[in-house]
Image (cartoon, rainbow, N blue to C red):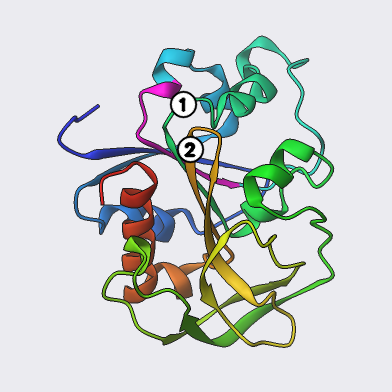
């Protein structure tokens, strides 16, 4: 890995996405090197290799509880995921990652929502996003903006998190970006990020770039 860059494990699986545009999203980020990989690859890697990433970005949507009782080539995902937050490594849970493992208390803790029951969702919604904390490093030089994305009607996160971005939309949670600390890790959660409408949005790119830097204490 390049020690002059922020090295990010971008972990996927359980939900389709636009691969070229997703790749381009990270290629446009200055100072960041993304290693896009399926959860099987991440879980199969040595612990030392997983720990070497500055940030782990989780873009997965597995719905069954994780297990280590899998063929050897698929690794031990439960063990690998439970390792998260036990190092200062930054964590980002993005878009459908909020919905992963709906019955796993560990994921509730990461996301900061006690009951993650998805009531509804809606594609291609024009969102008027409101910056709630302009002084937070993740929100640096960002002001309210509009973009098109998918929404989730979920319970808002607990009062223990710091709300960074909000929206008023019929089928959306009110808080759409938030930050908190889980054990040793800074964690950033984001409802946004469904497809190229988001990936190509300049403010979304800036938000995610700054979130990556903040979670690993580089901003």
For disc 2, the marked residue is: 185
Query: How many numbered circles does the render carry?
Result: 2
Q: Quadrant of residue 150?
A: bottom right
202 or 167: nearer the eye? 167
Is residue 48 highlighted in magenta? no
Residue 87's disc is: 1
Element at badge 2? strand
Q: Is residue 134 left or right of residue 164?
A: left
Crowd around label 2: few <14 · some 14–19 · many ≥20 (10 Å)? many
Residue 68's disc is: none
**Residue at the image position 38 percent from the left and 56 percent from the top:** 211
Residue 170 image position (x, y, % from top left): 73, 87
Q: Is residue 182 left or right of residue 136?
A: right
**Residue at the image position 58 percent from the left and 32 percent from the top:** 39
Height in image: 132 above or below 108?
below
**Residue at the image position 68 percent from the left and 47 percent from the top:** 61
Residues rendered magenta in the picture: 50-59
Q: Is residue 22 visible?
A: yes
């Amino acid at each position: 890995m390049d020690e002059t860059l922020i090295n990010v494990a971008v972990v996927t699986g359980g939900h389709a996405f636009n691969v070229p545009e997703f790749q381009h999203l990270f290629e446009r980020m200055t100072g960041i090197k993304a290693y896009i990989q399926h959860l099987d690859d991440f879980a199969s890697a040595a612990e030392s290799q997983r720990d070497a990433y500055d940030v782990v970005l989780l873009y997965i949507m597995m719905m069954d509880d994780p297990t280590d009782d899998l063929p050897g080539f698929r690794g031990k995902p439960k063990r690998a995921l439970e390792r998260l937050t036990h190092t200062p490594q930054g964590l980002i849970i993005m878009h459908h990652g909020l919905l992963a493992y709906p019955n796993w208390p560990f994921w509730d803790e990461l996301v900061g929502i006690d009951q993650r029951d998805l009531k509804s969702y809606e594609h291609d919604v024009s969102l008027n996003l409101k910056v709630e904390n302009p002084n937070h490093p993740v929100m640096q030089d960002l002001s309210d903006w509009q973009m098109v994305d998918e929404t989730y009607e979920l319970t808002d996160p607990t009062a223990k998190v710091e709300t960074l971005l909000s929206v008023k939309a019929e089928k959306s949670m009110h808080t759409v970006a938030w930050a908190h600390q889980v054990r040793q890790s800074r964690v950033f959660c984001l409802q946004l990020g469904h497809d190229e409408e988001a990936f190509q949005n300049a403010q979304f790119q800036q938000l995610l770039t700054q979130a990556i830097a903040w979670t690993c204490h580089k901003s």
